[in-house]
Amino acid sequence: MKRHILFWVALLGAALLRAQEAPEGVTVENLRMARNGEYMVVDMEVVLSALEVSGDRAVLLTPSLKGGGQSLDLPPVGVYSRRRYFQYLRAGSMLGGADETVVRASQMPERLSYHAIVPYSGWMGDSQLELSRKDYACCSVVVGEYPGALLGGYKYVPAEPEGFRPQFVYVRPEAEAVKTRELFGQAFIDFPVSQTVIRADYRANRVELDKIYATIDSIRSDSDITIKSLSIEGFASPEGTWDNNRRLAAGRTAALKEYVSRLYDFPEGLIATSSQPEDWQGLRAWVEKSALEHKREIVAWIDSDMNPDAKERKIREAYPEEYRFLLEHCYPGLRRSDYRIKYEIRGFSDREEILRIMKSRPQKLSLGELYIASQGFEPGSDEFNEVFEIAVRMYPDDPTANLNAANTAMGKSDLKSAERYLSKAGEGPRAEYARGLHAALSGDDARAADCFRRALEGGVTEAGAALEQLEQLRKNE
C-alpha cells in the first residue's frame, strides 16, 4: 500500500454549517469540509437522539461526496439492535465493511463525532456532501431506504504556488512471515596450559562467562521470544602443533557447552558446537592491519600451501621479534569462543500493542509492523515521521526503510539526511522517484526530470504529475 503525502499543507477552502436536517431520525451539526494537502477532510457531529432502531433492525448511515458526475462513499455509521449486531458479528463482517463505525442501539450516544480523511481528487473541488439511510432486517434485507439529504458543499480556492511541491510515496515493506533474529558474541575464556576444564575463578573467566549468560538471559526471559538454537565455535591460536591445537579447540568448546547446559534447561540438541584448530584467517586479518615491518612476508606465508605447523615455524624462525609481538598482542585474541543465538519473535498485529513495544523495545518489531504503527497518524506529523525514523535505526541497511526515511527527511526540509538515506534506498523506480524529488527540492530541475522519467517508465504514476509540475514552474518563470 502506498501513502501519498504533500510537502506543504494548506486549508484551501472549507464548508462549515451549524445544523442541517438529514434522513429521518438524524440531525447533523458543525459540518466542516476542507482540503488538507492531498486529502479531503470531513468532520461533523451526527445527532442520533431521535433515531429509533427496533429489536430486529439495523440502520446504515452513509455520507457521500458528489460532484462533477462522480461520487465517493465515505466510511458509514451502522447502528444495530442487539439481535442484528450479533448476527453480523458472527458472520465476520458488518454492513458497511471494515471501515464502518459500529454502534449498538443499547449504547447509542446522543451525539456521534464523525471524522473521515480520503485522498483528494480534482472533482472534489466543487462537491457536495449527502447523507443517506438504509434500514435492514434479517439476512441483510433492505426494508427501508431514504433519499440522500444534502448537508453542505465545498468549493476549492487555489493557493498561489510557491515552488515545487513534492508528492511523497511511502512504500509498505513486505511482510515477514517468521521474525528470525540472531545475537552474536565472543568470549575469551582462559585455560591452564594444555587443559580443557573451565575454571570460573581463573583469571578473567567470570567476566567472560557472565557475558554469555547476560546475552542468553536478555532474550530467554521475554515471553514474546523463543530461542531456536545456540551455536558455539571454538578457536585456538597457531602457537604449538596442529594436532594439539585441534584437541584443545574441540575439548574447550565441549567444556563450554557442558558448562552452559548445566545452567539452562535447554532441549536436547539446541546447543551445537564446532571448532577451528588454528585461526589463521584471524591472524591474517590482524597482521594486515598491523604496522609490522615484515607483514607482507608474513601474510605471504599465511597464504602459502605449506602445512600449518610449517607456516608457524617459518614465521617464528625468520622474524623472532615480530613473532614474540604476535604471541603477546595477537594470539590471545585468537583463542576464543564465538557464540550465536538464533531466536524467533512472535508477530504483532494490534496497532496499540505495536506502539507500546515501539517505545520500549522497537528491535522486536518488523518493518511491516512499524508500518502498521504509522497508519493512524496524520501524514507528515511528528508521530508519523518518528515511526519511519525508528524503522531506519532498527534496519539501517534496508532499502525500504531508507526510502521511507528519506521521504520524512525531505518533508522536514532536511535534504542532507535525505541524501544519506537515498544512497541506501536501492535502485528501483520508487527510489528513482524519490531521488527526483530530492533533486527538484535542491533546485536541480534537469536531474529531477531525468529521474522522474525513469520512475514513470518503471510504473510510478506520481512521476508524471511531478514532470508536469516542473514544466509548469518553468513556464511561470
Image (tube, rainbow, N blue to C red):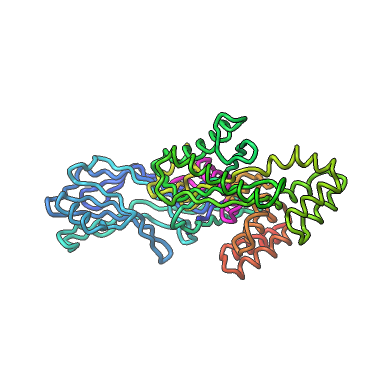
Where residue 315 sits: x, y (%)? 81, 49
Q: Is residue 446 above or below residue 282?
A: below
Task: Tell me the quarter of the image containing the C terminus.
Answer: bottom right
| Residue 476 among those drawn in magenta | no
Q: In this image, 316 relative to 8: left or right? A: right
Q: In this image, 296 relative to 343: left or right? A: right
Write down the quadrant of residue 111 in the picture.
top left
Magenta part, dominant SS: helix
| Residue 384 among those drawn in magenta | yes
> Which stretch appears magenta?
376-404
- Residue 10 in view here: no
Q: Could you tell me how many numbered marks the image carries?
A: 0
Q: Residue at x 61, y 54 (%)?
A: 166
Where residue 279 sits: x, y (%)? 68, 50
Where residue 267 sits: x, y (%)? 39, 48
Q: Is residue 164 above or below residue 265?
A: below
Q: Residue at x 81, y 46 (%)?
A: 316
Q: Residue at x 80, y 55 (%)?
A: 301
Q: In this image, 427 relative to 11: left or right? A: right
Write down the quadrant of residue 129 in the picture.
bottom left
Q: Nearer the viewer, residue 130 or 406?
A: 406
- Residue 414 in view here: yes
Where residue 400 sits: x, y (%)? 56, 55
